[in-house]
Image: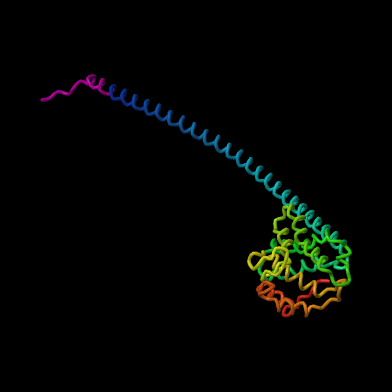
Amino acid sequence: MSRAKPSHLSKPVDEIALMSENTQLSSALKSLAIVNKELAFQNAEKEKRAAELVIANKELAFQNAEKGKRAAELVIANERLHGALMNTVRVAMILSELRDPYTAGHERRVAEISVAISAELGFDTSRQEGIRVAGYLHDVGKMVIPAEILAKPGKLTEIEYSLIKQHPQAGHDVLKGVEFPWPIAEVALQHHERMDGTGYPQGLRGEDIIVEARILAVADTVESMSSHRPYRAGLGIDKALAEIERGRGTSYDAAVAEVCLKLFREKGFNIPE
């Protein structure tokens, strides 16, 4: 028969197990405390970064608002500069007309005809504006020609005509120092050139003549022939268009001439008053 072990013999075993469990629990609690501290630190860092992002976003919003304000101010400033430029161009045109009162309005009418042609050719609004400015200023070189020659009622002598032919170069020399966003000086220089090389002052041919000058050449011819001059009465729009038709592809750019003829004959365009 076996004997039961005395109860006092099992106590050390229970105490050892309990002490082991307490040690493990204490270690786990310490680990948990460390984890909690780490989480608390990470949360604090996240909150700090979130606060910094809020501040950064506010700063970006402020900077964007300032950029928007400056952009609006630049738009206004550019509009004022553009207005000042156009007013200066008009003053130059008026001075040119005062020098040659018998052709007053010529530059403005050539400009409007040229703009209408350029629009039909597909020029964008900026390029059309350049054409308008070129029309306003294309004859500015006439200011160097003696007034008595400009206003002479009879036929010009060969010497007088040679002086007249100097105005494209004179206009170019005046305008080349102005930084226009368009080739205004080149148009002034080339608006009397002809596609077949018979024009002046350089005798340029075809594609050597910039397209803006080719447009001005047609518009200038139409306006000049239609209007009164000191040496003759106006010939009328029909004769002017007949000249463009006759010189289409030889004296005048074929595409430009075709557009001009359609504008007047089919689309009802009229020379502005």
Residue 137 appears left or right of 26: right
Is 229 magenta? The answer is no
Is 6 magenta? The answer is yes
Residue 207 appears left or right of 74: left
Q: What residue span does the magenta drawing correspond to?
A: 1-14
Q: Viewer-proximal residue, 54 or 19?
A: 54
Residue 25 sits in quarter: top left
Residue 19 appears left or right of 68: left
Question: Residue 68: image x %, image y %?
Answer: 68, 48
What residue appears at the point 30 percent right and 24 percent down from the top-left corner? 20
Question: Residue 138: image x %, image y %?
Answer: 77, 62
Question: Residue 24: image x %, image y %?
Answer: 34, 27
Q: How many marks?
A: 0
Residue 34 appears left or right of 141: left
Residue 203 sits in quarter: bottom right
Q: What is the residue that sits farthest to the left in this orientation? A: 1
Question: Residue 257: image x %, image y %?
Answer: 69, 74
Q: Viewer-proximal residue, 189 or 27?
A: 189
Q: Viewer-proximal residue, 182 or 3?
A: 182
Quarter the C terminus occupies: bottom right
Residue 58 sits in quarter: top right
Quarter the N terminus occupies: top left
